[in-house]
Image (cartoon, coloured by chain):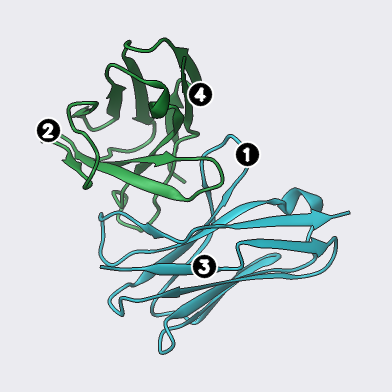
Amino acid sequence: GENVEQHPSTLSVQEGDSAVIKCTYSDSASNYFPWYKQELGKGPQLIIDIRSNVGEKKDQRIAVTLNKTAKHFSLHITETQPEDSAVYFCAALVSGNTPLVFGKGTRLSVIA
Amino acid sequence: GAVVSQHPSWVICKSGTSVKIECRSLDFQATTMFWYRQFPKQSLMLMATSNEGSKATYEQGVEKDKFLINHASLTLSTLTVTSAHPEDSSFYICSTGADRGSLGYTFGSGTRLTVV
């Protein structure tokens, strides 16, 4: 089955700097890659996603890139702010309406 | 986007009692719901997949008689933790599947269960 690896597990950046989180997946049939932000005591919230027919997607300060050949995708957050501090999860989906396969998460701390 | 309401947000119960967690899709019909369990500082662990009108499919190692899932309508799925024990204390989260014609799995806000 699909396996998703996520790195790093923790990341500290200065406010205003960029943060990059990387994920790799194993199943070349995976075609949908969402990123979730989870704040303490809350459920995960979708922040951006990308489908396999797209190489890059951007939404304001957040961008995701996908390299299908290498089977990896990355989350880029620019101009980080303290409110970006949270746990971020990447995920992969092989086919519609099956469970997402999650990475282990990255705890991002933005230091003011 | 989709709205999923999960209740309660937290609950404390005594060992041996049962607790029901509700997950409602407020603006669309959810034929599939996923239930997860999350331990502190860990990722989400899939417990089961519930489909409206049929029995849930449980992941290996999850006791189906302990974690009862009901998905009797397209807007409501429930997880009942029966005869709860302290080791069942955890954060439980529901999620929709891809029901809206687009891929947009939406998560509930989670339920913190503490068994004393």
Residue B31: percent from left, percent from top: 22, 41
Looking at the rendered structure, whether the residues under marks 4 and 1 are on a common chain is answered as no
Looking at the rendered structure, whether the residues under marks 1 and 2 are on a common chain is answered as no
Q: Disc 3 to disc 4, how far (Cα)?
A: 28 Å
What amino acid is labelled 3 in the image? Gln
- Provide the residue designation for mark 2: B53
Residue at the image point whose x is 36% and y is 68% from the top: A3
What amino acid is labelled 1 in the image? Leu
Residue B96: percent from left, percent from top: 34, 43
- Provide the residue designation for mark 3: A6
Q: Nearer the viewer, residue A74 or A105?
A: A105
Looking at the rendered structure, whether the residues under marks 3 and 2 are on a common chain is answered as no
**Secondary structure type for disc 3:** strand
- Labels in figure, total: 4
Q: In this rendering, is residue A64 above or below B47?
A: below
Looking at the rendered structure, whether the residues under marks 1 and 3 are on a common chain is answered as yes
- Provide the residue designation for mark 1: A40
What amino acid is labelled 4 in the image? Ser
Residue A38: percent from left, percent from top: 58, 46
What amino acid is labelled 2 in the image? Gly
- Judge depth for marks 3 and 4 and give the one in front: 3
- Provide the residue designation for mark 4: B9
Which chain did the renderer colour cyan? A
Q: In this rendering, is residue B37 above or below A110?
A: above
Q: Disc 2 to disc 4, how far (Cα)?
A: 26 Å
Q: Disc 1 to disc 3, how far (Cα)?
A: 19 Å
User: Dot 2: few (<14), some (14–19), or many (≥20) neighbours within 10 Å?
Assistant: few
**Secondary structure type for disc 2:** loop
